[in-house]
Image (tube, rainbow, N blue to C red):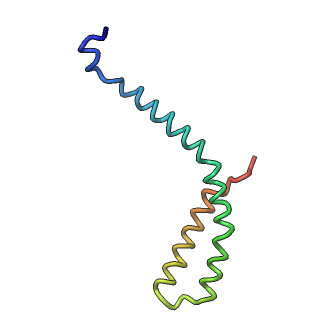
Amino acid sequence: MLSKSSLLTPRPLARVGRDADAALSALARLLKGPLQFVSFWAAIGLPFAHLGILAQGLESASTALLFVSLLALNAVALYFGHGYKQH
């Protein structure tokens, strides 16, 4: 039977940290492949959206903001997708 004092003693904080690190590490390994896949293909497809916006023109501020936002998104996609299918 557990004593009352052993029920009040929390798990060691170091063990909780190791468990959290292991869980995050497993989650990162699980998501790495799909994230690279989506990012790789987004980096390939987004320039076509840029061409469409440029063909329309950047007269309005909202269109210019959309263009710059897509450009930033393309840079992020390039960063995350650059290692896709490299062995």
In the picture, measured across the screen, residue 65 lies left or right of residue 14, that is right
Q: In which quarter of the image is residue 52?
A: bottom right
Q: How many marks?
A: 0
Residue reaching furthest to the left: 4
Residue at 30%, 11% in the rendered image: 2
In the picture, measured across the screen, residue 45 lies left or right of residue 2, that is right
Residue reaching furthest to the top: 1
Q: Is residue 3 above or below residue 45?
A: above
In the picture, measured across the screen, residue 23 lies left or right of residue 45, that is left
Instruction: Locate the N terminus by quadrant.
Output: top left
Residue reaching furthest to the right: 87
Q: In this view, does 45 lie above or below 83?
A: below
Residue at 51%, 33% in the rendered image: 22
Residue at 54%, 41% in the rendered image: 27
Residue at 65%, 81% in the rendered image: 51
Where residue 23 sits in the image (x, y, percent)? 50, 36
Where residue 79 sits in the image (x, y, percent)? 61, 59
